[in-house]
Amino acid sequence: MHPATVEFEAFYASGASAGQPATGLSDGTLTASVSSGGSYANLDNQTFSEVKPGRYQFALSSSERAGSVHRFACVSSDSAVKLLPVPTVISDNVAAIVDGLKADENFAGVLNAFPVQSMTLTRNGGHHPDDWSADTSVSEGTSGSGRTFWQDGNIQRIRRSGFISQIRLQTAATHDVGALARLKIMRAGTVVETSETFKLTDDATTSQTIELVSPVPVEVGDVVGIYIADVGSGVASGLTLTTDAGQSVKFATGEIADDSSATTLAGYSLNLAVYGTGPKLAITGDSIAEGHNGPTDYHGFFHSGNVPGGNEASEIGYAIKQILGASYGYENHARGSQTFAWVRSTGIPSAIDSRAKSILIHCGVNDVAQGREWSAIEDDLDAIRDLVPSTTALFINEILPWSDGSDGQAATVRTWNANLATWCAANDATLILCHDAMGQTRGTTGELDDLLTAYDQDGVHLTEAGVSAIAGIIAAAIMRSQGVNVTGFSPPASSEIAASGGSGAGTDVNIVSVAGQPVNSVEDFKSKNVFRVPSPSSPEGSIGKAKFNIPDHLRGDTWAGFANALVADRDGNPVDLTGATIRMEVKSEKDVKSSNHDGADVDAAIEFSTSSSTIEVSNATNGLFSIPKRVVDLTPRDYVYDIQVELANGDVHTVLFGTWKIAQDVTR
């Protein structure tokens, strides 16, 4: 059974409103349809509602939600309006949802926190139009074959993997015919993608925007180029160039397949830029943020000595994306050996230009190494706060333990982390607590001043396992900032790392560990529903409790239950469930609130227990229990629940509690 509604986001792809939500669309502009594997038929109910600016929701009838239906689509009659299906990726003026958004109910809350990419189109390579100046030009040549042009160097390469849906360029000459052109994407010197053909405008030094019908796939580090056909004898065409020290443009005769033969124009940038759906996260900072981790490095576009790319398992941003899903686009604006001063002057302005919804800073160890004062760091932070828009979420990592640092430097790291906490609290920024979780005790200080051995690549940088661990901590912070009620994410314990193959195990090592249970991706979490039950405020050694609001559930549908829920003490050690009785009761929230006044007991609407075999102790010595999936057919209303564990010694603990809304299924 498919969901009761489908949603699409609409935005303008051209004109003065390009990249902005298309609000207030009429019934005649959007047409929704459904397919059972063949042709499409309009939905029975064409009425839609605008649930938020630019986001439209269509209701589905029972027949349209039947199991045979596998695809919903929405078409805009306005070619200037692009549609972004939820939760898939950008298409042309047609958007579709495959498989009816069939999401596991228990994971709907997490999925809904990251439903779509940003609707804003942002530059993903090429020369920024704000910096264009028609200082000189290049033509298509006189051979009759045309020419291919491309930008050399790192700074204008593709910055994030995804799709290019828009091209902006500046023409060089006036003529009476439109020169034919095609976008070219090069990778390792070879043309790997070519766009559809489009025409250049006939006016000189005119900025032109081309909307691609078929978006072009790109990867980080790809080179942006363009082929311009010869328009005929005596007729000039081409693009303008901007004088740009340190940059260079290359070109070759004809529509080339590789860059093996080229002429170089040094000191220029081609007035050409490409755009795609904007990132959700921009990361800036030092070498750890850039990716100088693991056995081999990853390099960002600010790194002058290497082409962007490398070992993705060494890059924190890539590891975060593996957790939060393929739609969680990011850009790497970091550079090795940098301090907060560079982040202030270069990293943050570049990250802001990406128009990412969130910015993450990982920095500080170089500031400590260079002997900078906290007052200078605070000045940098204040300037960063002034630069970052209030609508952009700002995350700052604690400085990690520095194994090769002196005891005095380790003390500075601890002091500065405390200062960062104070500054973040006062400046609407989120401090990500990663120092202690990644550290182990240093004998000379008695503090967590060294990286865990499993995370320590060279005394300062991280192993691939360390990258995975800190990415899990960051992903959890991002989830919570989005309102997702997920508790207790922590990095893998060192014993788990060893069991999984050691510090070089890469993706085989847990990306996220929740109370000792491996969660290698969001999809993995979806299937496992693993969570830590003790709260950090629980007395040491005790069994704690945690709040987990079960996502809304349609009456009569199958609930996935809980798989491998862990009962642990405050330190995360599993509690032996041998001989324990576990019970989950679900009661009407309204009735429970009333009983608080009159003291009357409330009957459970539904109950699961080990006594009735509806709860299973899946691994008693490791503290794991499961509630198998089942049909839940409760009267639609708001409910509350808790899970209570009575141990063999008679101790009783409530380990989990929260709310659960049962919604009406329209097919009943």
Image (spheres, helix red, strand yellow):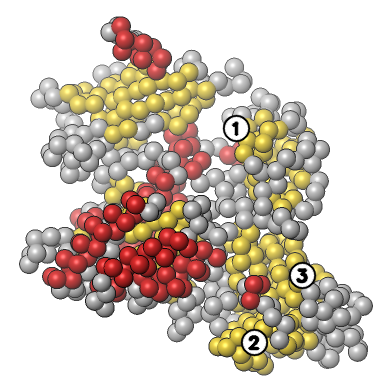
Give the residue displayed 36% in from the left and 75% down from the top.
338
| Amino acid type at image mark 3 | Gln
Pick whichever of labels 1 and 2 is earlier in the sequence: 1
Left or right: 544 in relation to 424: left
Image side of residue 584 versus residue 332, left or right? left
Q: Which residue is mark 1?
A: 2
Q: CA distance from mark 1 to mark 2?
A: 56 Å
Tag in front: 1 or 2:
2
Q: Looking at the picture, does residue 411 appear above or below residue 49?
A: below
Q: Earlier in the sequence, mark 1 or mark 3?
A: 1
Number of residues whose C-alpha sits closer than 10 Å to that of mark 1, classed few (under 14), some (14–19) or many (20 or more) = some
Crowding at dot 3, Cα within 10 Å, few <14 / some 14-19 / many 20+, comes out as some
Q: Label 1, secondary structure: give it.
A: loop
**At which x and y percent is residue 237?**
82, 83
Mark 1–mark 3 CB contact (< 8 Å): no
User: What kind of element bears circle 3?
Assistant: strand
Sequence-earlier tag: 2 or 3: 3
Q: What's the residue type where badge 1 is placed?
A: His
The residue carrying mark 3 is 208
Q: Is residue 344 visible?
A: yes
Q: Which residue is mark 2?
A: 243
Quarter the C terminus occupies = top right
Residue occupying the point 41% across, 70% down:
343
340 left or right of 403?
A: right
